[in-house]
Amino acid sequence: MGRLDGRTAIVTGAGSGIGRATTHLFLKEGANVVASDINADGLNETVSLADAEDRLVSQPADAGKEADVAALVDLALSTFDGLDVTYANAGVSGGAIGLADTTPDQFMEIMRINTLGPFLMAQKASPHMVKQGKGSLIMTASVAGLRSNAGGPAYAASKAGVISLAQTLSYQLYNTGVRVNAICPGLIETGMTKPIFDIARDRGSEHKLGQLNPLRRYGVPEEIAGAALFLASDDSSYVNGQALPVCGGLSAGHPFATPGKA
Ligand SMILES: NC(=O)c1ccc[n+]([C@@H]2O[C@H](COP(=O)([O-])OP(=O)(O)OC[C@H]3O[C@@H](n4cnc5c(N)ncnc54)[C@H](O)[C@@H]3O)[C@@H](O)[C@H]2O)c1
């Protein structure tokens, strides 16, 4: 028996990294999945790597566009006759742009995809969940939304916004049975972080990646997918309005000069 048997989920950003791993794990756990990404090639690859194709439909969409998000919800309802879980995970880092060189347009585009996207998904999906008295809205934030030093100002602000959405929307959906939570990944090897990993490998300094957290390693997409499965399933039935760091402990401490010893 799977932990999501009979449930229907939408996953955005499913064409790569965390979204792909989550799509595959949700399918393995018995869910019907509507997988979406703006990158049709990446999405097709996710589909080609999946088992249980009868429980998977894919739809290219821009996660920051209202009509596209509404269409994903309609697709889930018309194909699978229900909607239990959404994972608004699509996101962009915007690259290494700092205070001086971030244009207003760049700032707003990052906000549109990273923050407006999860808002739109919650707005379009929650009425159906409210009707059934149950549902789980999951969003990808970041440790960058908790504290500084994990991304540029626009990215960090966009992810702090996602954490605020999880908190605020859990109360907007007061007494409905619909839960809203965010996941805050630390450094995960995905398409988004590929440039960092490529540079480190070129320089022979890959062993330094992830050394700032107490587990002293970077994470892999499957470790975030596991957290998404927890939040999607009844295992988290009393978890609501939270931002769950999955970061090897990075966000638990202050910066330190020399590693502590056990
Ligand atoms: N990788 C990390 O270290 C890390 C850390 C913290 C948070 N995150 C967050 O995790 C989420 C997933 O990213 P990832 O690390 O798997 O990176 P990724 O680049 O591998 O995957 C992100 C996916 O989102 C898609 N996407 C981008 N813009 C979109 C749009 N407008 N509409 C629909 N899809 C769009 C991309 O095409 C891509 O397939 C993002 O929200 C990211 O900010 C990642």
Image (cartoon, grey):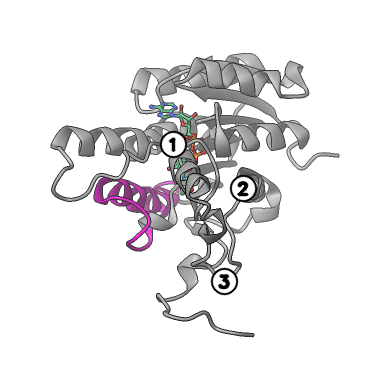
The 10 Å Cα crowd at callout 1, few under 14, some 14 to 19, many 20 or more, is many
Kindly identify which numbered label has been placed on residue 108: none
The 10 Å Cα crowd at callout 3, few under 14, some 14 to 19, many 20 or more, is some
Check if residue 45 falls in the magenta segment: no
Kindly identify which numbered label has been placed on residue 220: 2
**SS for dot 3:** loop
Query: Where is mark 3, residue-wise?
Result: 214
The 10 Å Cα crowd at callout 2, few under 14, some 14 to 19, many 20 or more, is some
Mark 1 residue CB less than 8 A from any atom of ligand 1: no
**Magenta portion: prevailing SS class:** helix
Residue drawn at the location 71% of the way across and 37% of the way down: 25
**SS for dot 2:** loop
Three-letter residue code for mark 3: Pro
Mark 2 residue CB less than 8 A from any atom of ligand 1: no
Q: CA distance from mark 3 to mark 1?
A: 34 Å
Q: Specify whether residue 254 is in view.
A: yes
The disc, 2 or 1, on the residue closer to the chain's N-terminal end is 1
Residue drawn at the location 44% of the way across and 40% of the way down: 195
Three-letter residue code for mark 1: Ala
Q: Is residue 3 above or below residue 81?
A: below
Three-letter residue code for mark 2: Val
Is 207 situated left or right of 6 in this image? left
Is 39 situated left or right of 230 in this image? left
Quarter of the rendering occupied by the N terminus: top right
Quarter of the rendering occupied by the C terminus: bottom right
Q: Nearer the viewer, residue 45 or 22?
A: 45
Residue positioned most to the right: 1
Q: Locate residue 132: give its quadrant.
A: top right
The disc, 2 or 3, on the residue closer to the chain's N-terminal end is 3
Kindly identify which numbered label has been placed on residue 122: 1
Q: Which residues are magenta?
A: 146-173
Of circles 3 and 1, the one toward us is 3
